[in-house]
């Protein structure tokens, strides 16, 4: 994966100055009527022949010609209200970079969310807007107005669930997603802010919006203090219990995901801090590299997909996690493996599920003596396929699955545990696990 947003030349620095100035700008009012978050509502385009198709579209906004790329689900049904996700590009990036996934293609399209949405099979409309000068300075709120105008066109031309509108962005795109959460709290159900800062402004900024922030400890472009500040804005707005969520140690090359407690029902706040890749939306545990097989796409997809448009869901568990779990099952299904003395055992937990897919977590536990490596094996049920694994190495042969420890986490002291997670297609079931250690 190509590093994103890490180069700040003279033009970029000038744009940042403009953006910081615009952060003090007060925007105009809400440009459209919207359903309250959590309330499923069909847009005006439902039940009609679609007037928009996948591809690049041009729209007049604020006296300018603005463009966006649209991805309409295959087999689009005008009688089905669809979730809609905006993917905001970084400074110097483009709408095409977000839509195409760059060098990683489909795997990283819309920060990996398009692939997971397709795997879930429930249909999502994706939109990649193009920022002026490849950024989101948002002077006088013009980029917020651009989003208003896109939504008016999209909701009139397609069947959109107006209670299921989201925005995800990295760096400058994160700043824009934050600005939308501030300015349009009755429009956006949730936002995902990857390594952001207050660069695009925060008009309003007092109402609750479901919020997930992700940031690296060693971010040398927008230091993590910026991300904490954005997060704390919505900790207050969402009436969460203030806390200092745990973050991984510098040099640990791991991540920790924490869901805040006490938040207003239906308005969770989640914080994902990582050590390793610096200023990047796709960190990978165990190295200072990045890639489409990052854990961040699973974390954000699970956060967004918990909102089903039929009303607020319960606030996620507050237990810190190093897996992309923000909505654990209230009655997790677990099954232990056998535990020979000195070897290891493995326990499965159901974390989340959706039509056509699910997320699982496996906890590996050393026996009564230290181990230096481990492998967990199980057999997939009919129709199941594994699509993503984090904190482990996947091998499949037909229906047989084995996950070995990653290079950095094979050693466990006696009685110590380690978890890995995975996403799968198919109907969720409880597997019988075996754990072995050389």
Image (tube, helix red, strand yellow):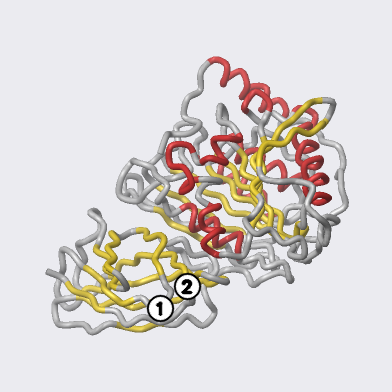
Which quadrant would the C terminus be assigned to in this image? bottom left
Marking on residue 321? none
Tell me which label, 1 or 2, sits earlier in the chain: 1
Q: Residue at x 67, y 36 (%)?
A: 56
Q: Residue at x 50, y 36 (%)?
A: 223
Residue 296 appears at what percent x and percent y?
Answer: 47, 52
Residue at the location (79% across, 47% down)?
51
Quadrant the N terminus occupies: top left
Q: Position of residue 299 (x, y in %)?
A: 50, 58
Q: Position of residue 22 (x, y in %)?
A: 73, 28
* Residue 277 position (above or below residue 265): above
User: In the rendering, which numbered label is found on residue 382?
Assistant: 1
Q: Estimate the x, y position of residue 322 in percent, counting from the top left.
A: 41, 60
The answer for how far apart the CA atoms under marks 1 and 2 are is: 8 Å
Q: Is residue 367 left or right of residue 27?
A: left
- Circle 2: element type: loop
Query: Looking at the image, which is closer to me, 220 or 72?
Result: 72
Q: Secondary structure at mark 1?
A: loop
What is the number of callouts on the image? 2
Task: Answer few, some or many: residues within 10 Å of disc 2's Cα (few below 14, many 20 plus, some between 14 and 19).
Answer: many
In terms of depth relative to the viewer, which is nearer, 421 or 85? 85
Q: Find disc 2 in the rendering and name its residue.
A: 426
Question: Residue at position x 63%, y 60% from top?
Answer: 123
Tell me if residue 232 comes above or below residue 346 in the rendering. Answer: above
Q: Residue furthest left?
A: 438
| Residue 98, placed above or below residue 368 | above
Q: Quadrant of residue 360?
A: bottom left
Q: Badges 1 and 2: C-beta atoms under 8 Å apart?
A: yes
Quadrant of res 230: top right
């Amino acid at each position: 994966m190509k590093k994103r947003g890490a180069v700040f030349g003279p033009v970029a620095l000038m744009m940042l100055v403009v953006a910081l100035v615009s952060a003090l700008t007060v925007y105009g009012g809400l440009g459209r009527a919207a359903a309250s978050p959590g309330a499923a509502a069909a847009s005006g385009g439902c039940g009609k022949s679609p007037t928009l198709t996948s591809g690049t579209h041009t729209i007049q906004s604020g006296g300018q010609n603005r463009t966006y790329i649209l991805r309409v689900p295959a087999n689009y049904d005008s009688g089905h209200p669809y979730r809609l996700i905006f993917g905001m590009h970084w400074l110097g990036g483009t709408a095409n970079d977000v839509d195409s996934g760059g060098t990683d293609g489909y795997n990283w399209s819309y920060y990996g969310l398009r692939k997971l949405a397709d795997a879930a099979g429930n249909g999502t409309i994706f939109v990649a807007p193009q920022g002026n000068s490849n950024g989101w300075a948002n002077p006088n709120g013009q980029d917020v107005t651009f989003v208003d105008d896109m939504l008016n066109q999209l909701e009139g031309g397609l069947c959109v669930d107006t209670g299921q509108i989201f925005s995800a962005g990295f760096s400058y795109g994160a700043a824009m997603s934050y600005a939308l959460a501030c300015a349009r709290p009755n429009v956006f159900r949730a936002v995902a802010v990857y390594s952001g800062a207050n660069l695009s402004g925060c008009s309003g900024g007092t109402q609750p919006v479901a919020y997930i922030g992700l940031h690296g400890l060693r971010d040398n472009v927008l230091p993590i203090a910026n991300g904490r500040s954005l997060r704390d804005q919505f900790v207050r707005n969402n009436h969460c219990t203030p806390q200092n969520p745990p973050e991984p140690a510098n040099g640990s090359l791991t991540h920790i995901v924490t869901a805040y407690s006490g938040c207003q029902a239906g308005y969770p706040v989640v914080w994902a801090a990582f050590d390793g890749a610096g200023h990047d939306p796709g960190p990978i545990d165990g190295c200072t590299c990045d890639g489409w097989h990052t854990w961040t796409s699973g974390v954000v997809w699970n956060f967004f997909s918990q909102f089903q448009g039929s009303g607020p869901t319960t606030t996620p568990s507050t237990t810190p996690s190093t897996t992309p779990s923000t909505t654990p099952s209230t009655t997790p299904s677990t099954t232990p493996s056998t535990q020979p003395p000195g070897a290891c055992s493995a326990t499965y937990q159901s974390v989340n599920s959706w039509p056509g897919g699910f997320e699982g977590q496996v906890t590996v536990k050393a026996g009564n003596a230290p181990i230096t490596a481990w492998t967990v094996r199980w057999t997939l049920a009919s129709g199941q396929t594994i699509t993503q694994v984090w904190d482990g190495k996947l091998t499949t042969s037909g229906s047989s699955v084995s996950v070995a420890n990653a290079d950095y986490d094979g050693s466990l002291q006696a009685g110590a545990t380690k978890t890995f997670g995975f996403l799968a297609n198919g109907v969720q079931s409880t597997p019988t696990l075996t754990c072995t250690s050389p």
